[in-house]
Image (cartoon, rainbow, N blue to C red):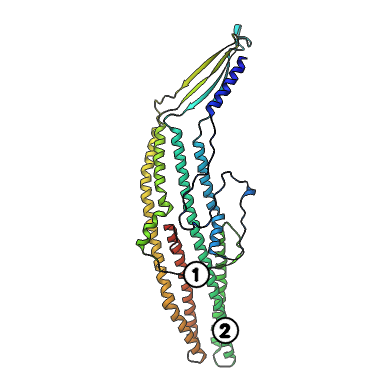
Amino acid sequence: MRQKIIMSFGTMLLILFTGCGAHQVDVAWQEARPLGKDLTTPKPPIRPPTVEESSQLEEPTGTINLRQALALALMHNPGLKAFSWEVRAGEAKTLQAGLRPNPELETEIEEFGGSGDLSGLRAIETAIQLGIPLELGGVRGKERQVAALETELAGWDYEAERLDVVTRVNQAFIDVLAAQEVVALNAELVRLAEQVFNTVKAQVEAGKVSPVQQMRTQVELVNSRIALEASKRGLEGARFVLAATWGSTSPAFEKLEGQLDTAKPIPTVEHLVNRLSQHPNLARWPVEMAHRRAVVQLERSRRVPGLSINGGMKYFNESDDVAFVFGVSLPLPLSGRNQGAILEAEYDFVQALEERRSAEVAIHTAFATTYGELSTATGTVSSLKDEVLPSAQSAFDAVTEGYRIGKFDFLEMLDAQRTLFDVRGLYIDALAKYHKALADVERLIGEPLQ
């Protein structure tokens, strides 16, 4: 009967001290920057899915545009998904930090199996105790605060990676568009080279020009075909780079739909530099400083050692009596008072001040460099489009017509043709540089420029 009382008492203490368990909640993530905010970026479920439950990529076919490419990448980019699970892991860590330490149930049997009066089980004494560790100095609350701030920082890392994915998609999309234009340009060059070769061949057969001119046109034709094949290989490589942004190793889309020739005037430096504070690498620093400060407070609170309280009941078999037992254990901080950990946390806090300044300098330096590239590309595109390209086209048209009526010789016509196509190639390259620099600037300010 007394043993039943002891067991009931132990069960009651266990329920009393254990309390209710906490549950993980879906905490708010960092607000997305304006760049790409209108596109869906899914968050992983609170409960990890099985492999069978993971979302499957439906590879796009046919013609796709930039928005479709961005949507695919934000939904399926493996790196971005990995960062999202890091946020979930931080939430789980915060959950764990908020839980009470587990109690310890201890059972002790004494005074049996000895000699004389203590032989057998007649003098046995049975004790059951519940030990509860108590954290002093608010350690658990500070641990939870540190874990919650680390989760916020993981959210900022996720947002930075999201902007990186948007930028990589934009730039890879531009590379494919430019490669498509280069292939089309080289295909046109091959067509013209074939026309010139056939014309010169007919003139040679008629005895009007030297066979040497036919050999030269044949060389131009072979070179143009080599350039066409090289540009096709470049296009295929660019397609693979773009498909990799949404986790594909075998692109199935046929072509991209987009406008490469859309360069517009850019805002001034003063208009854009104030928006750099939106970049996650700068916007995260208030949270980072709060986290370092919270770590210092946590380590200081650990100077106070925790204690353990033990309580229960003891049953004396010989007299059939029951008594309460109680104990307290407290570590004595004679030498170790967490001095090293406190000093380390204080050093980390001071280090964070310098890291914040370093991040600000890095972002502003990157902006100055990228804005300079964008400004240069804008000027180059404008000059080529408004001045150089029209002049080259006019010269080619005039020389072609002059060659047809015998006013210009063969070499002059080839030179005009080569100049025109070189300028058109430079124009495509300048447009690609403009759009890629534009994507870098938009990443730094965290929003679209237009």
Residue 245 in view, yes or no: no
Residue 142 position (above or below residue 45): above
Residue found at x 45% / y 84%: 395
Secondary structure under tag 1 reads loop
Q: Position of residue 382 (x, y in %)?
A: 41, 73
Q: Position of residue 41 (x, y in %)?
A: 53, 54
Q: Position of residue 36 (x, y in %)?
A: 49, 58
**Alpha-carbon span between mark 1 and mark 2:** 29 Å
Give the amino acid at mark 2: Gln
Task: Bin the neighbour count of mark 1 within 10 Å (Cα to Cα): few under 14, some 14-19, many 20 and up.
Answer: some
Left/right placement of residue 72 relative to residue 274 reads right
Secondary structure under tag 2 reads helix
Q: Observer-nearest residue: 184 or 323?
A: 323
Residue 122 in view, yes or no: yes
**Furthest residue to the top?**
116
Q: Quadrant of the image for the N terminus?
A: top right
Q: Disc 1 marks which residue?
A: 260
Q: Disc 2 marks which residue?
A: 195
Residue 115 position (above or below residue 79): above
Residue found at x 49% / y 74%: 425
